[in-house]
Image (tube, rainbow, N blue to C red):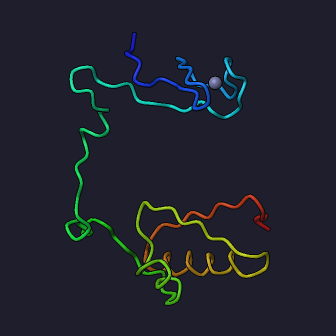
């Protein structure tokens, strides 16, 4: 059997549980159960904290980030120089403001750079 790594604690009454629940069975409060990592008894430090060390901002390596120009100057500027491979960007705006249009332009420009583009939409038909 796998060793349990997390416990769930009610922030209202302090009850601990083996599994998450939406409503605390002791104090009947909703959304007060939060996940906590069990401490390693040898080190009394959560494993996540042992693995990471503080790093100064100017020591962070940016070389592995591959930014690719969308060939739309203003969009590249907003994205900090282009889109980052493997990243996710949320584009928001009022209806009719041109979100789909700018994404079509970006997809066209990236395809013109021999990149594969997959366009997925839940709102538009193919015809
Ligand atoms: Zn509670």
Instruction: Give ligand 1's quarter of the image.
Output: top right
Identify the image quadrant of residue 115. bottom left
Q: Is residue 12 above or below residue 2?
A: below
Identify the image quadrant of residue 87. bottom left
Q: Residue furthest front?
A: 13
Which residue shows up at 45% across the image and 30% down it?
36
Which residue shows up at 51% across the image and 81% down it?
109
Q: Is residue 23 above or below residue 101?
A: above
Q: Is residue 107 above or below residue 51?
A: below
Residue 59 x/y as whole percent: 19, 67
**Front in this rendered view, residue 1 or 27:** 27
Residue 98 x/y as whole percent: 71, 81
Q: Is residue 21 left or right of residue 43?
A: right
Q: Is residue 21 left or right of residue 69?
A: right
Q: Is residue 66 left or right of residue 69?
A: left
Looking at the rendered image, the quarter that the N terminus falls into is top left
Q: Is residue 7 above or below residue 82?
A: above
Residue 114 x/y as whole percent: 43, 74
Looking at the rendered image, the quarter that the C terminus falls into is bottom right
Q: Is residue 64 left or right of residue 104?
A: left
Identify the image quadrant of residue 62. bottom left
Residue 69 x/y as whole percent: 43, 81
Number of marks drawn? 0
Which residue shows up at 48% across the image and 81% down it?
70
Q: Residue furthest top?
A: 1
Q: Residue furthest bottom?
A: 73
**Front in this rendered view, residue 32 or 121:** 32
**Front in this rendered view, residue 69 or 18:** 18
């Amino acid at each position: 059997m796998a060793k349990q790594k997390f416990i769930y604690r009610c922030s209202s009454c302090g009850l601990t549980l083996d599994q998450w629940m939406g409503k605390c069975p002791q104090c009947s409060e909703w959304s007060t159960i939060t996940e906590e990592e069990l401490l390693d008894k040898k080190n009394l430090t959560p494993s996540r904290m042992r693995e990471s060390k503080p790093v100064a901002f100017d020591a962070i390596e940016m070389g592995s980030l591959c930014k690719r120009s969308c060939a739309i100057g203003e969009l590249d500027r907003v994205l900090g120089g282009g889109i980052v491979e493997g990243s996710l960007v949320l584009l928001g705006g009022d209806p009719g403001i041109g979100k789909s249009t700018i994404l079509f332009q970006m997809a066209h420009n990236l395809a013109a750079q021999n990149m594969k583009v997959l366009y997925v939409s839940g709102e538009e038909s193919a015809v």
